[in-house]
Amino acid sequence: MNKEIGTIERRKERLDRGIKVRTEGIYAISSLEEVSYLVLPRLILIIGLLLLPAIIPSLYWKRVISITCIYALLALGFDFLANFVGLVSLGGAFYIGVGGYMAAILNKSMGLSPILTIPIATLFGAIICTLLLLPALPLRGVYFAIVTLMYPLAIARIIEALNILGGTDGILGVAGFPTRWIEQYIIILIIIFALFGLRRLVNEDIGLVFRGVKDNDQAVRASGLSITLYKSIAVFIASGLGSLGGAYLSHIYMWSGISQFALDFSIIPIAATVIGGGGTLVGPLLGCFFLVPISEFLRAFGTLRIVFYSIILLTFIMFRSEGIMVYAQRKYHQFERWVKV
Amino acid sequence: MKQEPILQVIEASKSFGGVQALVNVSFEVREGEVFGIIGPNGSGKTTLINCITGFVKMDSGKVLYRGKEITNRPPNYIANLGITRTFQIMRPYYSLPAYKNLIVPLFSPRARKKGGWRGGGKLGDRETVSIDILEEIGFERDSFVPYKLASSLPTGYLKRLELARCLALKPEIILCDEVFSGLSMSEIASMVPLIEKLQMDGITLVMIEHRLRELFRVANRVMVLNFGAKLTEGTPQDVMQDEKVKEAYLGSEKLLDYTFEA
Ligand SMILES: Nc1ncnc2c1ncn2[C@@H]1O[C@H](COP(=O)(O)OP(=O)(O)OP(=O)(O)O)[C@@H](O)[C@H]1O
Ligand SMILES: [Mg+2]
């Protein structure tokens, strides 16, 4: 009793910044300071990404940036499907493989340049993936996930067994990019557009339909909308991002092969989403910029790197299970201070 | 009130495994009326609505809308005809604010056709239209309620949100599955005029209710279900006095209570 009288009691007070009006998405901005409060984080992200190729000197790590960006496309697609549409997709490898092979074939047998192969592979890769996943769309949760995982495994084995599309050697001699700078800056611009495009999309009216499908698909049907249609549009978008990444990958390595159907492409985007914070879109993207370089560092340890990997993931799940960006965004929009009681 | 049937159900049957949820149920709903459906728990009322709206496939039987067969069509097709429903267990989008909940039905082909690409035609974009609908249904425009997450809304508002979703589709028929249940007396008192207003606007209403007193006040005709079969049909007065109904439904004494209050 007596002890407490002497000490000052303090309480942590948490306030929301006053610029959000009534609901997310409606702001009242009255000063330059408040404008910068909204714009600054975006600006820092964009400038940071654009500076990366310039500040990283070694050729090896420049290549890592491009690969990281490809994983970022997959992570964006995964986060979009999982947290805005309610489809857990392990199809990263599927999308990469389809896009990768398609770009390689278009380039090798039809002689198209990367300027054409990448957009064509993106579009038709998305169409093929969506059509093949169409029967799985009514499935939910883990069942959908299993189907998306089954395709890349099956296709890789088929290519191996039938010795088609270059068999185990893959397709060699695909055209590369003229310079490293072009290679990096195009993919960096692509992920910036993909990030802000998706963020825009999920807040548009059609985005609300996607989120409705996740929250309550029966209510969406009662609202006169076909859930199969909207799920396939969403899968089209995500698989398009993945196929784009795959096509890009083929031109980076000037090669396409069955390792493009490797499980890494399905797993790392999920890990990045866990670390970065699901449902933020930017979180999974940054998660890739954390995870992919680390996994490159760990390459020296051979298969042991899986252990390090698991430790990092476990740490995140246990201590910051919401993910970095969810935490960071909350801290940014609220401020805390001590008040005397 | 016009007399031609807007909705006809002919010999609808449905069983779940061994449970006969519906046994040869036939009835028709006339345009512009309030048609009540009552019955003890588990008598198949919700299943009937599910069959009409395509959420459950019927084993046999037919559903006609304005004479056209719509049996077992997909739910979104039926909703686009203007046959809308509420859910007994409310189904809002919990992670969206109330007014954003309505963007989804406003995005449907039917609402777009009636309201133009932006949703409200000359009336404005979908958000404006959605706030208007919410106000009509009892969300105070100047309060924070329309902007709150659906997960933080109390039952009364969620029931209204269910109705609002139907209204966003510019419905011909609303099938209400127990919109009064779980509400306090005063909340129901404020809902009754709303139902009457919908009827005056020319919307046909089919209402499943356990709150007989309130239902009998608004209903033109009432059908009684028991163990999935139709027991009787008639005006509220006729139904109340029916011996079979008293026996099957609540036990004769309890129904009499309702009768006196009504
Ligand atoms: N999807 C389903 N699967 C299996 N059985 C079901 C299903 N839906 C309903 N039933 C069964 O069908 C019967 C009728 O159920 P229904 O929900 O239609 O009754 P209800 O009249 O709406 O009851 P309540 O007044 O409690 O809402 C019940 O025995 C129920 O257990
Ligand atoms: Mg029911």
Image (cartoon, helix red, strand yellow):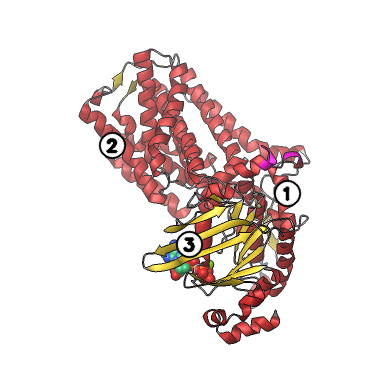
How far is disc 1 from disc 3 in space, using C-alphas? 54 Å
Question: Callout 3: helix, strand or loop?
Answer: strand
Quarter of the image with the C terminus of chain A in it: bottom right
Kindly identify the amino acid type of the residue bearing the numbered disc 1. Answer: Val
In this rendering, is residue B128 above or below A55? below
Dot 2 and dot 3 residues touching (CB under 8 Å): no
Q: Quadrant of residue B232?
A: bottom right
Q: As rendered, which of B6 and A297 lies closer to the eye?
A: B6
Q: Residues within 10 Å of mark 3 (few under 14, many from 20)?
A: some
Q: Is residue B229 visible?
A: yes
Q: Nearer the viewer, mark 1 or mark 3?
A: 3
Label 1, on which residue?
A: A21
Label 2, on which residue?
A: A154
As drawn, is B115 to the left or to the right of B210? Answer: right
Q: Nearer the viewer, mark 2 or mark 1?
A: 2
How far is disc 2 from disc 1 in space, using C-alphas? 51 Å
What chain does mark 1 sit on?
Answer: A
Label 3, on which residue?
A: B11
